[in-house]
Image: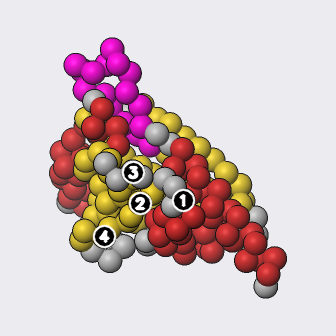
């Protein structure tokens, strides 16, 4: 019975995720941070990383708006970019405190505006030692058939910048302590 329930849950989740269950193209960035994974996760788990990145990248991010939620699963976040005419909206679909994984699904903007049918952002905080970890940022995406010739890709630079900002922020605060 448990196997049947598990299979049904898996099928429902796969149907809900739609194209995400198929193979996606991926762009990945990794950065080692000299801070405990738990400290990095505190920043990434909720809205902290979005707010810190927006504060540090004022020439790139005009505003961060929480359209729904409090930073947990179901939260909808909108980033508006300078000069203010483009934006990206995502919904947090998974937050796993044990594995230190956060997943967001793009709703509009980003590569969805240039021909992608899906954009999934996955952030993993991977413990190396008690005082160091790796921030792995991954964007999974699929391109609509009619746009394949244009080869649209999401931009992973903002996630790479967020990881670097985290590294600088936590390593400098560690040295200040």
Instruction: Find disc 2 in the rendering and name its residue.
Output: 62
Neighbours of disc 1 within 10 Å: few (<14), some (14-19), many (20+):
some
Q: Who comes first in sequence, dot 3 or dot 4?
A: 4
Query: CA gap, disc 3 to disc 2?
Result: 7 Å
Mark 4 touches mark 1? (CB < 8 Å): no
The residue carrying mark 3 is: 83
Image quadrant where residue 153 sits: top left
- Inspect the magenta stretch and tell me whether residue 2 lies in it: no
Q: Is residue 39 visible?
A: yes
Give the class, few, some or many, for how many residues have Cα within 10 Å of label 2's Cα (few <14, many ≥20).
some
Tell me, for residue 57, which label it has, or none: 1
**Residue at x-position 63% and y-position 64%:** 166
Q: CA distance from mark 3 to mark 4?
A: 20 Å
Marks 4 and 2 sit apart, C-alpha to C-alpha, by 14 Å
Please give the range of residues in magenta: 139-154
Is residue 148 rendered magenta in the image?
A: yes
């Amino acid at each position: 019975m448990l196997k049947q329930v598990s299979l049904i849950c898996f099928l429902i989740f796969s149907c809900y995720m739609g194209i995400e269950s198929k193979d996606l193209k991926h762009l990945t960035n990794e950065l080692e941070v000299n801070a405990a994974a738990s400290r990095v996760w505190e920043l990434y788990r909720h809205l902290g990383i979005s707010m810190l990145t927006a504060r540090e990248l004022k020439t790139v991010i005009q505003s961060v708006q929480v359209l729904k939620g409090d930073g947990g699963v179901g939260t909808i976040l909108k980033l508006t970019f300078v000069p203010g005419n483009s934006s990206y909206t995502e919904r947090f679909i998974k937050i796993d405190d044990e594995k230190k994984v956060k997943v967001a699904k793009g709703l509009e903007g980003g590569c969805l505006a240039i021909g992608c049918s899906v954009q999934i952002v996955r952030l993993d905080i991977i413990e190396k030692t008690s005082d160091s970890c790796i921030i792995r940022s991954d964007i999974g995406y699929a391109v609509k058939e009619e746009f394949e010739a244009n080869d649209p890709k999401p931009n992973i630079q903002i996630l790479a910048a967020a990881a670097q900002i985290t590294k600088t922020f936590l390593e400098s605060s560690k040295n200040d302590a």
